[in-house]
Amino acid sequence: MIQQAAPLAYDSKIEGNIIFTKLDSAINWMRKNSLWPMPMGLACCAIELMATGASRFDISRFGAEVMRFSPRQSDVMIVAGTVTYKMAYAVKRIYDQMAEPKWVIAMGACASSGGMYRSYAVLQGIDRLIPVDVYISGCPPRPEALLEGLLRLQRKIEGESSLFDQKKQLLEAVS
Amino acid sequence: MNLPDILSSIDKAFPEAVLTRTDFRGETTLELRPEHLRPVLALCHSKLAFDYLLDISSLDHLGDDPRFELVYELSSMQHHLHLRIRAKVSEEHLSAPTVSDLWPTADWHEREIYDMMGIRFDGHPDLRRILMWEGFPHFPLRKDFPLEGKSSDVPDVAFTAPAPLEGGPFVTVASGAGVHRREPRARRPE
């Protein structure tokens, strides 16, 4: 992305310090490489989530190691585990408290579809309450699968129209 | 103290109480008349050294009368004894006396039975649901409650909806023929 400065505007003091890009690309690039997860660990998937955060798999290679236990500081909620009906509104409340922009990863069979729990007590997929960006299969998924899901989410964020779609109110206010 | 002594003490104190006695593989089960349940359990606790209540469970004999049954597993740490006590609970009078004042552990067991089966315990200090939430209108461990659940809604607390069973329940079969054969599927009972 570093552009060669035109000879006419050559200035050795700022050489190499200017990048030409689209605002969207810059915003998305910054966002996708420091996703702060909200670890919504509800069952055994949370153990794999912890393994993903630990040294062997090391989620910090992808900039998502800052697990925040406060929804107000989080960007992506990783729903890891079985969402019971008793817990369902609590998950939704935490999602509602997260600041925009926010994303959701449904980790594992239970969070995606209720999994093996076709039962009176289990919500049949967290997408019945909150919008989900990435579904990860597995019971539980291996850490590699979670990292793959995270990379898919990063690719999705790259393509977002972050300025026009997400800053609509701001743009209307200044125009 | 040994088990025959204990059984004869129960017989002496409450000659009418025991309906049947079953011995199976060294375990003794007494079925009691419901009205004698609490006095016999109190006797077991205070005089017969059953200082530990292992578990209380409940059964739903749908179609029978009386429909429900309670099972108390008593244990004596002092004498290394075990005694199982059962008593029927009818659907018309859906309650039993609490034993949470005798064994504090009965508190949560009785709450669970109330939550799952709907049997109330008279004299219980805090008879709330323990697994489901207040306001859930069903008792999910009863035989006439469907596996997929029923709809319910308690605003701002929780809701439920029937789960898609797709012809299920999905069951596996014991087989050495490989994973493909054992895969859980909707199978009709043969």
Image (tube, rainbow, N blue to C red):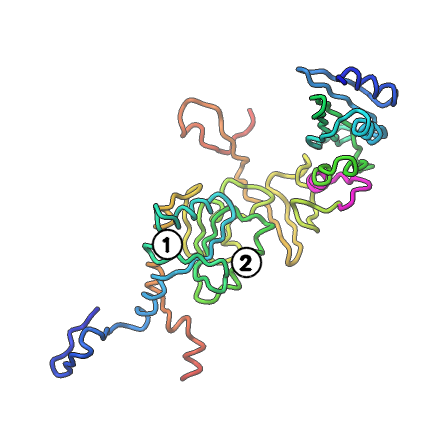
- Residue depicted at x 45% and y 77%: A169
Q: Which of B118 and B175 lies nearest the eye of the viewer?
A: B118
Q: Which residue is mark 2?
A: A92
Residue B127: say if magenta: no
Amino acid on which disc 1 is placed? Leu
The magenta segment: B111-126
* Residue drawn at (67%, 49%) of the image: B133
User: Is disc 2 in contact with disc 1, using a CB cutoff of under 8 Å?
Assistant: no
Q: Measured from the top left, where is residue B162 in percent x and y?
A: 59, 45
Q: Earlier in the sequence, mark 2 or mark 1?
A: 2
Query: Which disc, if any, is residue A150?
Result: 1
Whole-angstrom CA distance, mark 2 to mark 1, is 21 Å
Q: Secondary structure at mark 2?
A: helix
- Of the 4 image quadrants, the one containing the N terminus of chain B is top right
Q: Give the x, y percent position of residue B5.
A: 80, 16
Give the residue type that dot 2 points to: Lys
What is the x, y in percent for residue A96?
Answer: 53, 63
Residue most extreme to the front: B78
User: In the rendered image of this protein, does residue A87 appear above or below residue B28?
Assistant: below
Between B10 and B111, the one lying in front of the other is B10
Q: Quadrant of residue B48?
A: top right
Share a chain, discs 2 and 1? Answer: yes
Q: As drawn, is A143 to the left or to the right of B100?
A: left
SS state under label 1:
helix
Quarter of the image with the C terminus of chain B is: top right
Residue A15 is left or right of residue B132, and the answer is left
Question: What chain letter is assigned to the residue under label 1?
Answer: A
Q: Residue at x 75, y 32 (%)?
A: B68
Indicate the position of residue B25 as horizontal and vertical percent values.
66, 15
The subunit carrying tag 2 is A
